[in-house]
Image (cartoon, coloured by chain):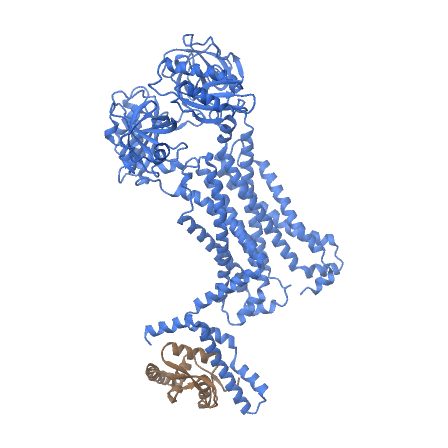
Chain colours: A blue, B brown
Amino acid sequence: MSWLQKFQLRFRAILSKSKLDAEMDEEMCAHIEMQTEENIAEGMSPEQARQAALRQFGNVDQIKEIRRELRGVAWLENLVQDVRYGARQLIKNPGFTAVAVLTLALGIGANTAIFSVVNTVMLRPLHFSNPDRLVRIYSEFPGFPNGGLRRFSLSTPEYLDLRRETTSWESIEAWQSGGVNIAGNAEPIRSTASFITGGLMRSLGGTPILGRAIVPEDDKPGGPLVAGISEGLWQRSFGGDRNIVGRDILLNGSKFTVVGVMPKEFEFPPGALDASELWAPMQIDPANPGGRSDHNLNVMGRLRAGVTEEQARAELRSFVKHSAETVSGHSFDSTNHTIVSYGMHDEVVRNVRPALRTLLGAVGFLLLIACVNVANLLLSRAESRRREIAIRGALGAGLGRLAVQFIVEGILLSSAGVVGGLILACGWLKLIKSATEVGIPRAAEISMDTHVILFAVAVSLLTGVVFGLTPLAHVIRRNLHNALKSAASSTTANDAVQRFRQTLVVGEIALALTLLIGTGLMLRAFWNLQDVDAGFDPKNVVTMSVSLPYPAYQGSQVQDFWTRFETRLESLPGVRATALASGLPPSYSSTHTDTAIEGFVPTPGGPLQNVEFYQSVSPGYFNALGIRLVAGRFFDRRDGPDAPEVVIINQTMSRTFWGKISALGKRIRPGGTTNWCTVIGVIADAKNGGLENPTGTEVYLPFTQPAGRGRSGRMNIIVRAPGNPSPLIAAVRSELAALDPSLPLAKVRTMDSLISSAQSRPRFLTLLLTLFAGVALVLATVGIYGVISYSVARRTKEFGLRMALGAQRGSVLGMVLRRGMLLVTRGIAVGLIGAFIVTRFLSTLLFGITPTDPATFAIVSLALGIVAFLATYLPALRATKVAPMEALRHE
Amino acid sequence: MDDEKLDLLQGTLDLLILKTLTWGPQHGFGISGHIRQISDSVLQVEQGSLYPALQRLEQQGLLGSEWGVSDKNRKAKYYHLTPSGRSRLTRETDDWRKISKVINIILSTP
């Protein structure tokens, strides 16, 4: 027979299965009838003859099964049959199916959602050409307080040295980002721009969708000012005008010519909270680069082909050494001022990595718990299906066939689970993406791509196969014949299976406890964060930001504008207090400015002459924010532009440099100025640089005096009302427009919402963890309940017998409870050990609590113990309600 | 089952089926009856082996089949040898002769 004929035969076999089966039946029937006739001819009665013929023929079904498999396409036929059979089984037990599918969906849904985030944020490469060759380069000051000043920017001279003296990088580029006023089209807007060195776009491989990119030729000092804008800005502010290239816009009051539009994927700097929408050349003048200690450049590099990150770091170390020997003044050196580099992508996701890892761990635990539950469900169903399994075995289904059947059922369940899971995942993702305040880098890109779908399908297939097969394990243990026998009397329980199920429950409790303790720690850390004394009163305060563009505003114009603006605001009805400040709590980024402290002798290992926060404020600042005065006085009219220069410092600053001695009357000289300023007041610590961080050293300068003037180009306006401050915003806006209609009012926020945003990341992480842990707790409870109920149901006869023989209800109750609580205590013990090992990975996320906080461990264990007790108590109570006679009749 | 009746050696059933069909097309019942008759009821063909064997031989192209009517006017599936079945029989018969000769020699060696 040729292969073609064979193929036809097999193909026919698939298409006409029922026809072939019918022929097979007919052929064998004919055989039996012929045998019957022969038997009759030999003298048997028709009835006897038929019985004898059947006996002689043997097991018809087994022969049929063998012959079907011989057809060669049996596997396909069987599969179709198994799927149909499995689906029928699942539909027949809607309760079981619903619980199993829901459980799996919960597990798979949470995992798919978190994996989507991890996939987008951590795994998907940045949208630049060869992004794995890009590195960030930072300077660091390891000697600074609280573990040193890490990942700091470089000064322009340092950057130029680095470019000139190193060879590991194809190019080293720099940028500065900041808020800008953009005018020249309709209403002025506030946006974020990055001023970049000329080679940056080429190094990233950004191709504009219109016009051209910024090129090195644009980066000549004094050259024409050009800008590339983002697709978003182009659409939003210029209506997607195809003739935008060549048009002039006003950027902070200076005229820039738009040369190109960059595509949506061009996100630079990547992962920034305020995405840059405009890029313009920085035009560094090498002849006049600015101060060596003026750290204001963000730096990145593209590694030369063949150079490893490690080799590049080695070159940085020798660069630092060389700098220490050749540069005088503010030079790099190996101990106090170093330079480091890290992979660009790692840096983008560095802030969220611990949180994402924690979430991934949490959902992993959740999935395991879900799997344990489903395995338990399948096991108890397998117990009740022993007879069915045995009969199918007797009817010719081989072990392989049974295994396939179970896997098919498992996969059917998990497929339904994956469908439910993907739906749930969409919900989770919606929740995650809606939390824009959390500032997940690349959040807009988060989506379920093919990787995610593959991940979900892989997870479900794995769970389907593994947990489909668990019931079979105990079929293999006993042979089919025994199974058939023992199916008759269910009291001969399979102890091994019971032990296995109990181990599953112990594991489940341990997993749930670990997850709950982790969540408990996060919750308590979050509460600690709520209890932090911010040092100011955030109620009924609204803040906004205004930036005065240079050169439209310069010299005394800046102070004049602010003074007039503040005066107008003060006279608004409904305003209790107003103030201006260059920075705002609670998320003001530190500037770390070198500051001379009069009479202060630095000691090795002691504080450096450096101040973390400088604030340029109007006199009303402390009053408007409700910051307490500890010593001396606030600024007032005496501290005018020509009066002696004064500063107010915070308690931390006073303690750091003068210890117990009063700081009043002492003098400091802020970096970059020549005049000494006298300390006239000490205020209580306020949380400027993050609620979770220790308060830094702070200096407040009057914005009208020389030291403060340089920091007052962009100011925050603080308005306090007796009640809800939001209605005042419109009035502030019209006052601003009355003074200068070209100035946008930006960042309008209430202080309450600023504080809430500052906590949004820990809040959101805690929220997600709490939700996941809640689901885990429910699943674990269901798991314990299920196993205990099942064991009670199985032992109904035994309980009946015991009670018939005089056992008291209490002793039966006690027996079941003891058994249940034994599992629970074992689970808790294992879980405590697990939590002890695992929670240390949370330490970077915790605030004001140690990862092994005994109180949290104890309380969570106790709580889980109580819930588990209830889950055991209900079925145990049922055991005592067994009527002895009924129980003895039970099967 | 009587002690005198022998179970068929694995693989020999195919040979016997092929041989039986050299006398003309036959149905399954007939084939098993033939084998029993000719072997004086010493060889017992299990239906559990016969029908799968018939199917296997058919799939290998050694047998063909069609539905026909038996002497007693009953519809039955008749198997017949194909040319490749015939040549297979010749080859296997030779093999069998050689092997049984060798085995006889070995067994008769004192």
Relative image position of residue A23 (x, y in whole percent):
46, 78
Relative image position of residue A848 (x, y in whole percent):
53, 31
As drawn, A877 above or below A223:
below
As drawn, A63 above or below A150:
below
Q: Nearer the viewer, residue A818 or B70?
A: B70
On-image quarter of the C terminus of chain A? bottom right
> Residue at position x 55%, y 90% from top?
A40
A557 sits left or right of A203 in the view: right
A802 sits left or right of A824 in the view: right
A195 sits left or right of A114 in the view: left
On-image quarter of the N terminus of chain A? bottom left
Q: Nearer the viewer, residue A321 or A277?
A: A277
Q: Which quadrant of the structure image shows residue A390?
A: bottom right
Relative image position of residue A519 (x, y in whole percent):
54, 39
Q: How many marks?
A: 0
Can residue A167 be seen from the camera position used here? yes
As drawn, A883 above or below A836:
below
Relative image position of residue A484 (x, y in whole percent):
58, 69
As drawn, B88 above or below A85:
below
